[in-house]
Image: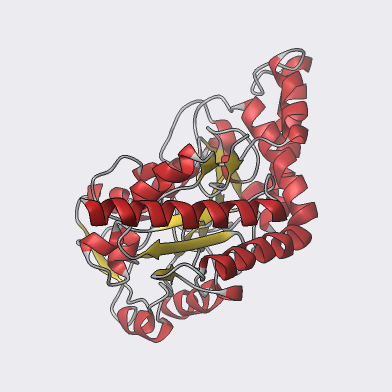
Amino acid sequence: MTIYCDHNATTPVLPEAIAALLPTLDADFANPSSTHAPGSRARCAVEEARREVAGLLGCRPAEVVFTSGGTEANDAALRGVLRLVKRSPKRVVTTAIEHSSVLASLRDLDDVGVDFAPLDAAGRVLVAELERLLRQPADLVSIGWANNEIGTLQPIAAIAELCRLHEVPLHVDAVQAVGKIPIDLRGVALASVSAHKIGAPKGVGALYVRDGAPWRPMLIGGGQERGRRGGTENVPGIVAFGCAARVRRRDLAAESVRLGALRDELWQQLRAIDGVVRHGGCGDDALPNTLSVRFAGVRGESLVAALDLAEIAVSSGSACAAGAAEPSHVLRALGLDESTAADGVRFSFGSTNGASDVTTIAAATATAVARIRTVRKVA
């Protein structure tokens, strides 16, 4: 049976979430906008899920807008703020290690200039340098709470305070952070969330929009989501999302400690392999479940393939960039050259993993690294 260690890409759907969504495919299938009794039951299920997601985020239910996922939430946040800005050109401050859904949206926007906040060697924003950038008028700051590839956590509280002082709205891509670390949205105007990262199905997510935040919806239709996102709600996905949010909130503290122990033990065992280098933050400065490393002389994609043959599923970076010829833009932003940036491998633990997996993964990795290096020498 495959050891799945790629939970930052997606997570298995929780049994509780499956049980919660099944009735919405059968007896409670009605449109939640309908005014009859079946429709009212569907609406009640959506609103209960909204309360659960709000509970995980620590916000009011009315501030949660359901979307099709994290990508839509990111795009809607950026465009929804910037379309209200009248001056030209508009200015956004972000980082070079953001998820592709943020960077691609910014590239696609007309009349928008982008400044990248400097980072330290672990990929953390240098707050003093960000403050310097904000001395010039900016229309939006967009920062990912936790990096999906290297696990580095950003100092969001300090960033939020800077944005407050400079009167700039702050959007946070919280897709990788929610459900793994405690979330405090004080000072955050908008935050993006994805259901399939916390044990719910793919195809559903949410955008937190703080009451009074400068934002206009992008999808205009039948007035769903209080007029903030048109289109009939994905009731099965939303209900499962709510259930997963409840479970993650309940288990957050204990699971964070457990996963952190797995991550740290794996690193201790991998350190025995010659030429191993760790990327990103450590300890409390990184996601508890994420370890990004590289091995000198070993291509990341080669190691991923070798581990796959050993029935261990890991990643060479973002799942959204799978198959891309380019090396990791995250590792490039940390100063690695193109060749070295292609060597990164990410291990991301989750609910399916236990202590025995660590030993198996470390041993298989050591074997694979030795084999790949031998082949390269022969070639």
Colouring style: secondary structure
Q: Position of residue 89 (x, y in %)?
A: 20, 62
Image quarter of residue 11: top right
Residue under the point 73% across and 21% down: 22
> Which of 228/289 is in front?
289
Q: Where is residue 102 in the image (x, y as percent from the top left)?
A: 36, 52
> Which of 140/223 is in front?
140
Determine if residue 59 is in view. Answer: no
Residue under the point 75% across and 53% down: 249
Callout count = 0
Compared with residue 167, is residue 328 higher up or lower down, i.e. above or below? above
Compared with residue 373, is residue 218 higher up or lower down, i.e. above or below? above
> Which of 108/7 is in front?
7
Which corner quadrant holds the N terminus?
A: top right
The reply, left or right, for residue 106 in relation to residue 251 is: left
> Which of 109/324 is in front?
324
Residue under the point 34% across and 45% down: 321
Q: Where is residue 272 in the image (x, y as percent from the top left)?
A: 51, 70
Compared with residue 240, is residue 251 higher up or lower down, i.e. above or below? below
Q: Position of residue 107 (x, y in %)?
A: 24, 52
Image quarter of residue 93: bottom left
